[in-house]
Amino acid sequence: MIARRFSRGFDMLMTAPLVVYAIMVAALFLAMFTQITRESLRIAFTDPALRHSIWLSLSTSTASTLLSLLVAVPSGYILSRRVFRGHALVDSLIDLPIVLPPLVMGLAILIFFNTTVGRWLDRGLVDHGLFVYQPLGIVLAQFIVGCAFCIRVVKAGFDAFDWRYEETAMTLGANQVQCFFLVVIPNVGSSLVAGGVITWARIFGLFGPILLVAGTMRGKTEIMPTTIFLETSIGRLEVALVIAEMMVLISLATLILFKRLGGKGVAG
């Protein structure tokens, strides 16, 4: 057996780009955090409109993530477990929201609501509209973009599951529903949670599609990413920095949670 020989010089050479890039990213965020002032913190946390944007960001992201999971669990299961006519087409369609710029997805949603069916869905039931320039439009845009990510992560969990356990349970008398909820789901639970976490992280900072579909009306459809845009446009850069830094901390905590749930393995 040939022993592996490690070269300290080679390892240092390969590590250098990582160190340089990590320092660059850290320097960018450090520069942001050093610009915080007490006055900017006071403005950010006492302004009712800004507090509303924080609450709306958290609530819509959570609602969209739960909705994505409701779709991703059965979708990921059937895509992983069955090969059906049109399987490749459906699989490719799901990838479109991942590879396309989010702004394109927002434009597609907006154009849809200009069609006959879309106008009826938006304003046929409620005069003021359900989606366009409404909070539900935020949830819809987040769901359209985020659900594709959720399906991919959840499907990876189903792909890694050994289906012999399910087959064994069925030979012992369990039906398919019992197998799914009592055997399959407990074994892919970490992938489901990881899918929810990474989906939440992805849609939490969504900006372009939401700006097109829901606009950015103070106290109504303004969320944290659009708050940064608004505050920067009116010259309150220090307040925009406070909101941005809150998003950095929330996103960092989400990524740490994702990695602790085994995110390294399920995203492949």
Image: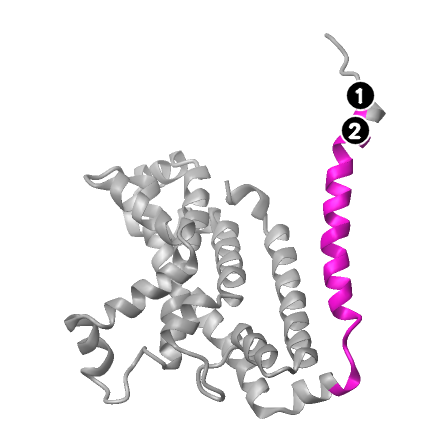
Label 1 neighbour load within 10 Å: few <14, some 14-19, many 20+: few
Q: Nearer the viewer, residue 22 or 184?
A: 22
Where's residue 90, x and y in %?
27, 46
Where's residue 168, x and y in %?
36, 36
Where's residue 25, x and y in %?
71, 54
Is there any visible trace of residue 13 in the rendered image? Answer: yes
Figure check: 193 above or below 61: above
Where's residue 229, x and y in %?
55, 75
Residue at 64% x, 52% y is 260
Under circle 1, the secondary element is: loop
Figure check: 209 above or below 222: above
Under circle 2, the secondary element is: helix
Between the residue at mark 1 and the residue at mark 2, the CA separation in whole angstroms equals 8 Å
Residue lying at the far top in this picture: please name it.
Answer: 1
Give, as a three-letter code, the residue at label 2.
Asp
Query: Which span is picked out in magenta?
Result: 10-39
Q: Nearer the viewer, residue 175 or 208?
A: 208
Label 2 neighbour load within 10 Å: few <14, some 14-19, many 20+: few
| Rendered image: mark on residue 11 | 2
Dots 1 and 2: beta carbons under 8 Å? yes
Figure check: 240 above or below 175: below
Quadrant of the image occupied by residue 246? bottom right
Residue lying at the far right in this picture: please name it.
Answer: 8
Q: Is residue 13 magenta?
A: yes
Q: Is residue 32 left or right of residue 53?
A: right
Give, as a three-letter code, the residue at label 1.
Phe
Residue at 28% x, 84% y is 129
Is there any visible trace of residue 69 in the rendered image? Answer: no
Q: Nearer the viewer, residue 26 or 265?
A: 26
Q: Which residue is mark 1?
A: 6
Residue at 73% x, 60% y is 28
Quadrant of the image occupied by residue 41? bottom right
